[in-house]
Image (spheres, helix red, strand yellow):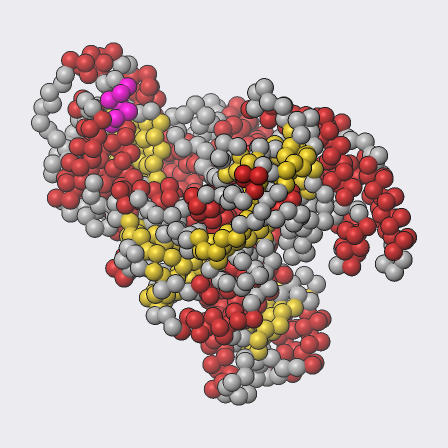
Amino acid sequence: MLHRLIRFIQDITGYMQQRRSLEPEYPFSKLFKKFQNILASNNEALELIADMGDKLGGDYVFDKQYILSTYEQLKNHVFRLVLDLNTLSPGKYVRLFEVFEDINDTIQQELSGKWVLPQGDFAILYPALSQDMYELVGSKNANLADIRNILDLPTPDGFAITTSAFRAYLERNGLCDYLVQAMSLWDPDDEKACEEIASEIQAHFLSGSFPPEMTRQVETAVDALQRSNPGKMLCFAVRSSAWGEDSIHSFAGQYQSFLNVPVHQLLDSYRKVLASAYAPGVLAYRHEKGFQVQELAMSAGCQLMVNAAVSGVIYTLDALSGETDTLLITAAWGLGAPVVDGSVLTDRFKVSRTPPHAIGNVALAQKSTMMLPEAAGGTKTVPVPDSRQHEPCLTQDQVQKLAEMALLIERYFKRPQDIEWAIDTEGKIVILQARPLHIRTQPGCTADHVAKAMSDHAILLNNQGIVVQRGVVAGKVFVVRNEDDLLNTPTGAILVARHTSPRLARVMRRIQGILTDVGSPMGHMATIAREFRVPTIVNTTVATRILKTGDSITLDASQNIVYSGLIPELCYDEITSEDVFEESYEYRLLRRILRNVSPLNLIDPHDQNFRPSGCQTVHDIIRFVHEKAVQQLIHLGDTRTAQADATSKRLKCAIPLGLTVIDIGGGIQAGNAMARDIGPEDIASTPMKAFLEGLTAPGMWSTEPMSVDFGSFMSSLTRTFSAASESARYTNRNLAVVSAEYLDLNLRLGYHFNIIDAYVSDKPNDNYAYFRFLGGVTDVTRRSRRARFIGEVLERFNFRVDIRGDLVVGRIKKLDRDIMIEKITIIGCLVAYTRQLDVQMNSDDDIHQHVSDFFKGVCVHDIGSENNGFNTG
Amino acid sequence: MTSDQKTTVLILDDEPIVCKRLKPALEKSGYEVESFTRSREAMHRLTERQFDIAITDLKMDGMDGMAFLTEVKKRYPETEVIVITGFATMETAKESYQKGVFDFVAKPFKLGEILEVVKKAEAKRRSA
């Protein structure tokens, strides 16, 4: 439907383009109306995106209907945006319809349950796997990919052969119908008949042939691995990774794995892994559990062998002892298979789950044999040299590192974990596999028991803030007040900060939880906290006052309560009883949809990729339309001066800005409708007022003559306008488009080109500010110093910052009106302060000096003196 | 009902995710909960026992939440019914209130929100 509509509109707009010279153009006021529509749709679309992101934190209950209807609304807004932009600049962006159609197609397919994969879906390298691909690659592969790609822990290189490959294999060999037919004869009471059926099925699987496309994709994946491991003879561990294998029904250990498989035997081993899923015992188990034979979807992991000196297993909770604060590590020399199947004696280390993970009981075994890889493939069992039989396999340091990694994995998956690991001959720890450890809730750990444990602890915060990510953790508070604090954040801390800030993302991996006084559940930090599943409550107003560094607390972000002291019973209860909502179908679907919706790739409008074909997500399209609409409006203002006169004014102020202001609604005080010149006092636009206040703050706009050294003088002569050629047109024509809540400012000051785009209203969700700075003059080093200075200042005020060369983009959003005003005032200060800056950037030390000077200047004027997470340098 | 007995809650929603998330959350808060994704089964359960509180979706595939609401109130007028729905129109809201619904919660909702409504319904039941 959308498809046909788009074709129709493309025809119309093409027609409009042809007729353009003949038809009278729209009156300026009509085009303004379009522009206002674009602004409104823009805000509503962004709001919907943020709303969907917010749902991922677990505090909401939503169903598939929510995803469908919200995306439907979003789609309509974006469609309107594309349409309005093409009316505003007839036919200029017809290509955008096609781009939107492609993105929409992908999303619709995801919504209808299909997988959309750019690189073919039979074999996928681990780095290319994203979250939520359980159905496609099975739990084992999906978990390992998350451990590698999100938690950034070392895992073996390799790839997944997907369930799609499995289906293609079944189809090619006519196995689908055969399986149903063979299993119809299954009779659990006739053991002998069952064994015959199973061995016949297995024989069918082992004699099948591979779809050529599948062979090709596996070869491509192997080639890629060979390129990143030049000169190495590749050998693989081939493991099963069935969909559902590690979930409620544990098929653990029932499927076969093959170790040290050379490349030429890879597909053969894969076939054996498939066949192992039809062994008599496995079939009987699945039959008994009520699984249909055609329900099985098998995937396999092909991992490069780790040259293991030591291998073992970690249980993040010691299931047998029932102790709530102990994890258990078992270890032996060589490869891990004998540890997993229990055929060798192992060293056992009991370790505290609380950092710094004190080692408790250690039981060393006599390790007489070990498994090693054979040079030509396969494995061998050899005796352990006498001298090492009684030696512990792990050092204290290794034990603690393993414990740290294991708990990071547990925190992410929110279930006790059963983890296989190895340490290679160079001493590097590698995680081979992680799956949930099924623990029956201890009889002593019922709700009443937990309630009793909780009653012994004072409640410090109760329903004080907004839950960003659910979950329960216990640990020590670490209050972050400045950059140094942030860098020194200890592992396992519960981080407490005045403000949410994208900067906290840097330590997200090593902290257990976050509490802030001020902040939005929809900002950038919230998104990252959800990605890492770090329990987080924002906007508590009092966290930094009530909590001190070193305090022991339990953060229950599921109930929105903070308790004094550690309550391991509550954490234990959370990870053993609560359903992991992140694993439910709806959450995974929403995350998959959002991958095509929310990432922003078009950050810089002057990047050559800033065009319709560069749009990869819905957000990109929204951003593109918005930017081009503003440019178009400026262009119209330029070319239709006569018509624009009614709404455009010249701003006269103490600083010569050469600024024309176009009011699209409530941006200029009423009563001045006829005047051509206005003063700052006539501005009614909230963000514009804030910006001007910062720009003209005393001490920020330096009028002192600068001493220019010879080097920077020469480079300013030789540098041309080319870097900012787009802006050359506006040299004497700075332009602001304003409304009561909106500001879009293109401001050229000397060689600096600033764009500020901001919206400030009483609805925090609509609020945002975008600041882009591109400078000229002087040499590259000084320019990049200046960029770093600006970046550092913006970061300290909790902007999300991107720096590329001498381009700086700062973004901030969804804060209360007053805080937004402060942030925009800061931008004003920064624009004024930076005006004269490049020539002074003689060394890197100057950056810090200027950051500190800037903050002093800002503090003198009492701007941002309190409300900004990190105040001083 | 006596105060040391747990308050009983029935949940009916054809979206399994709603039951799956609501049930443990209510249980953790001390309620005794049964959940259903099929109205026929929920209706049948009503013939066997009474619940203090019923939570139901209004618009579900192949069934009518309004009919369920009517049935509950007919059979047990004192049971408090909470409607959760993604499509609340003035019409359905009016009809639900006429039939004696306790409160309306729009989907998607926060767990905290629905717990609060359930607590209020419970308070009303206990004071009755």
Q: Is residue A417 left or right of residue A637?
A: right
Q: Quadrant of residue B98?
A: bottom right
Q: Which residue appears at 46% of the width and 25% of the height?
A: A609
Return the residue found at the far front: A386
Return the residue found at the far left: A704
Report the quarter where the C terminus of chain A lies.
Answer: top left
Residue A145 visible in the displayed image:
no
Percent of width and height locating residue A777: 24, 19
Q: Which residue appears at 20% of the width and 37% of the height?
A: A829
In magenta segment, residue A785: yes
Residue sitting nearer the eye, A271 or A171: A271
Percent of width and height locating residue A546: 27, 62
Percent of width and height locating residue A191: 87, 56
In magenta segment, residue A42: no
> Magenta-highlighted stretch: main secondary structure?
helix
Q: Give the magenta range.
A: A780-786
Q: Which residue appears at 63% of the width and 26% of the height?
A: A234
Percent of width and height locating residue A156: 57, 35
Residue sitting nearer the eye, A825 or A310: A310
